[in-house]
Image: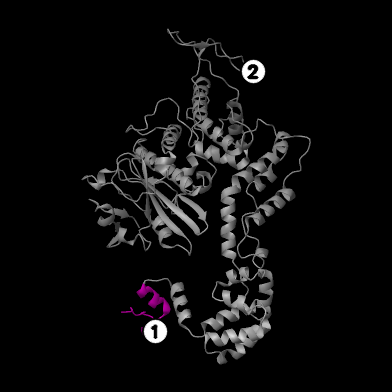
Amino acid sequence: MLRKNPEQPDRTTLDDVAEVLSIARTKLDEVLAASDPHAHIERLHNLLACIDPSLAATLHDQRHTLAAPEDLATWLTRHLPDAAEEVLTHVDDELPDALSALKIPLADANKRRSAANLDPLHNADDHQRRVNLWLQKHEDTLVGRVRDAFWPVYNRGEDMVDYLRLRALPGLRQADPAWADTYWDLPPAVLQARAEAWAERHLPAAGSEHTPLSLKPLAELRAINLAFLPDALRRLEQQISQWQSSSGANAVPHHLPEVPAVVEGMHADGTTDFTALNTASLTTWLHSHGHWPAGMPTTWIPVVPAPTATPGTATAPAPAPVPGTATPPGPVPVPGPRTSAAIGTPPPAATTNPNAGTAPTTSADRRTLGAAIAEALTPARLATRTTALPAPRRTPVASHPRLAKSDTGGRVSVTGPDLEETATIGYLGEIAAGKWIEHHYGVPPRQSWRSGTRAEEYGDGIGSDILGYDFVIETPQGRHYFEAKATSGDDPSFILGSSEIRRAQNLEDGEQYTILFVTHAKDRARIRVHELESPFSPEGGALLRHHHHRRHCALHPALYRLLTGPISCST
């Protein structure tokens, strides 16, 4: 029985019918059109309006004399003898497909439709989707090209405001409205040609100064600089503390900004884009941005007592003195090798056991662990798109750490015992999810990652924890959102925050929301990514059940076996 609309109890709409039949409204419209004896006349009228508006008007005037399809064929043969058969062949096609088959340019068809007082055929939403898809694939290359073109400007020490503006690719992110009357399916060649014309118009002309061959690709250079910062900032803080102690300058400890804040600031002014950072350039940047202690020389070096030599300890000669600074006497220990911890890069031989229970204590340690997990996610392991979860352990739900992103400021709240441990599991889950998306859709994490955790990898100010999703990509079918959830074990239990529920419940046409649930997030041998439909989608509706003012999700027993405790979806 159709449920009544409380505002109009005596009126049943086609939306009501579609809901009761469990079909899309567009599908219902197609069924009704096919059952209409005059539907074939309307389809032919729409097509003729793109070919000959006056003939379309004649058909409209005589439509009541054409009772059967054979009458329509006879009429069209009489009025359009040279093309009647071909037009009738494509009259049931989608109008853009029929125009393509009949080799009628969209621009010509729209001029004729305008003459017939009909709306033009536009595909603007798909054009924007095609632009997003194209940029998703080519943006890194384009931004790298902008950086290379501005190398001489940077090398001469000139103002970089134009570089910072053009690095955002203004003018290439929106579909050109002029395309609407010309293209239905936007060819990639058009987008490529627009990018070339944009570069020719905006980028500095090549002069006598050439980009050096030693200049690393932009993404690689940024990763190197991000890997350098954690230890460098830690050493500088220690140096500042020693200076304060030796000079009595200030009893209040001076703290430098956290790594993400420094990276975001350096990204904003282009510091990480042209050269590899070193201690001198980092100190200069901190000083120029007001982060260096007042009165402390940027070249100050602490006096370090000579260490007591022990058997087997390598030593190196003391460094050459820096003019105007104190010189540390005696030999200093030889530092061990340094390695980059960029995403997907093998970890150092060192110190953090990826399967251990102790959480890393710094973002650098966490990134090292993340690199180890990324390396363990081989193509063979990522190839299976599994939705089957393991049977839950008979353990109270409250004993498992929970991770939920706050809707205010992106802070992490947990009900488990260890904030650091929970944040690490969430970070590793997003590392795994990014690798999974790259494997299945070809979109690297730099393009898809949008959560606040992104700052630990890229520090470019793009990520946020109030969006309701962690990753987003464009596909030919539309926009696809991904929310990553993770656990250190295999109990399929997680929390959806209110922003995530809002995002999953309010999708536009062509949008999709998927949960990527990562089990054994810290175990390189057992980590797995499980692809789950949104609990609010028709396909995933069986995963959700309601209780009072909270939403309790339970994975359907026929799919994953019933959980021992509910999956709480906080609202």
Q: CA distance from mark 1 to mark 2?
A: 89 Å
Mark 2 surroundings within 10 Å by alpha-carbon count, few (fewer than 14), some (14 through 19), many (20 or more)? few
Say which mark, if any, is on residue 11.
Answer: 1
Quadrant of res 5: bottom left
Residue at 58% x, 58% y is 130
Q: Secondary structure at mark 2?
A: loop
The part of the chain drawn in magenta is 1-21
Residue at 42% x, 25% y is 350
Q: Nearer the viewer, residue 305 or 543?
A: 543
Q: Is residue 111 above or below residue 355?
A: below
Say which mark, if any, is on residue 324.
Answer: 2
The image position of residue 7, as x and y in percent, is: 38, 80
User: As shown in the figure, which amino acid type bears the numbered disc 1?
Assistant: Arg
Identify the mark nearer the N-term, 1 or 2.
1
User: As shown in the figure, which amino acid type bears the numbered disc 2?
Assistant: Gly
Say which mark, if any, is on residue 24.
Answer: none
